[in-house]
């Protein structure tokens, strides 16, 4: 019995052909033929059981046999905002693993101590799609372009005003200075069932001014434990903690 293969087709319900890159993978790599079964995912919560109706060198047509809406593994919106690492392999590793665990949105921050101030999101997008297919996730995380720290805070403030709904907002950092809010463990303050945003800083941490600015906008300072973690490790730990609490 052949393993059923998953393909990402954003508008699967209204087309009958795989996107070019997916088609080439299906035909050239997997050598799929007419009559083979496949599973399509639209990244918006629905799987589609389909069969191949035509396979050429560059094209793969299909017919949907069954529409399969998927239940969410977690209910609230899980948003992670991080400063990308100097070594992009680490950021890419995070994107892959966080998608496997499960989250909804990824934003990149340009901070005072950031060692990487520009990022190409096209490759990250491909990694998110690949991880979504590999882990059979029904929702593809939203990927945002890099934003200056202050602009990101303003964007979140505007988002809350428009929605009329407050989210849980946390900032992870290593400071213990007086004048900052009391830092508590993320696992002890995250509330299940509520939208949540966690910010993780660059290798050199957020600046003290950035932490104060975030706290003035309603972010709570948190710790992820006693260990000192790399940026990508901290981000993944945050996603895992929130995911577990919400399952």
Image (cartoon, rainbow, N blue to C red):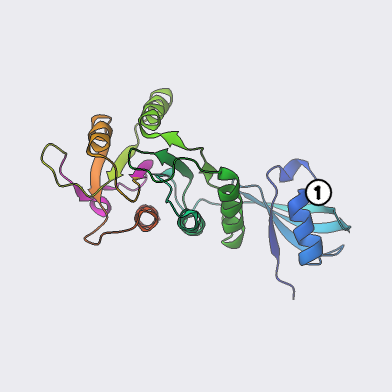
Q: Position of residue 142 (x, y in %)?
A: 53, 42
Kindly identify the residue that appears in the image at 37 percent across and 45 percent down: 193
195 in the magenta segment: yes
Q: Which residue is mark 1?
A: 17
- Which quadrant does the C terminus fall into? bottom left
The answer to whether 76 is drawn above or below residue 245 in the figure is above
Q: Can residue 194 be spotted in the picture?
A: no
Q: Position of residue 92 (x, y in %)?
A: 51, 55
Kindly identify the residue that appears in the image at 57 percent across and 58 percent down: 131
Q: Position of residue 200 (x, y in %)?
A: 34, 47
The answer to whether 149 is drawn above or below residue 233 in the figure is above
The extreme left residue here reads: 178
Q: Can residue 57 be spotted in the picture?
A: yes
- Left-right relation of 107 to 6: left
The answer to whether 118 is drawn above or below residue 227 in the figure is above
- Left-right relation of 241 to 60: left
- Left-right relation of 184 to 169: left
207, 98: nearer the viewer = 207
Q: Helix, strand, or loop for circle 1?
A: loop
113, 156: nearer the viewer = 113
Q: How many marks?
A: 1
218 in the magenta segment: no
56, 3: nearer the viewer = 56
Kindly identify the residue that appears in the image at 77 percent across and 66 percent down: 29
The extreme bottom residue here reads: 1
Which image quadrant for residue 114?
A: top left
Q: Position of residue 227 (x, y in %)?
A: 24, 62
Q: Which residues are magenta?
A: 181-199
Kindly identify the residue that appears in the image at 39 percent across and 28 percent down: 151
């Amino acid at each position: 019995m052949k393993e059923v293969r998953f393909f990402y087709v954003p508008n699967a319900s209204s087309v009958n052909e795989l996107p070019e890159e997916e088609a080439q993978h299906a035909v050239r790599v997997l050598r799929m033929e007419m009559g083979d079964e496949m599973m399509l995912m639209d990244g918006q919560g629905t799987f589609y059981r389909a069969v191949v109706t035509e396979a050429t060198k560059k094209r793969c047509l299909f017919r949907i046999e069954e529409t399969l809406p998927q239940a969410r593994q977690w209910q609230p919106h899980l948003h992670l905002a991080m400063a990308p690492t100097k070594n992009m392999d680490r950021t890419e590793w995070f994107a892959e693993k966080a998608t496997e665990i499960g989250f909804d949105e990824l934003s990149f921050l340009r901070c005072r101590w950031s060692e990487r101030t520009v990022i190409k999101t096209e490759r990250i997008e491909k990694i998110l799609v690949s991880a979504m297919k590999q882990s059979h996730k029904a929702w593809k995380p939203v990927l945002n372009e890099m934003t200056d720290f202050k602009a990101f805070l303003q964007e979140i403030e505007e988002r809350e005003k428009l929605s009329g709904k407050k989210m849980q907002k946390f900032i992870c950092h290593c400071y213990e200075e007086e004048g900052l809010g009391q830092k508590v463990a993320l696992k002890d303050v995250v509330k299940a069932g509520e939208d949540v945003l966690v910010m993780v800083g660059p290798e050199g941490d957020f600046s003290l001014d950035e932490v104060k600015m975030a706290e003035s906008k309603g972010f709570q300072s948190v710790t992820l434990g006693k260990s000192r973690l790399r940026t990508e490790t901290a981000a993944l730990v945050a996603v895992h903690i929130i995911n577990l609490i919400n399952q």
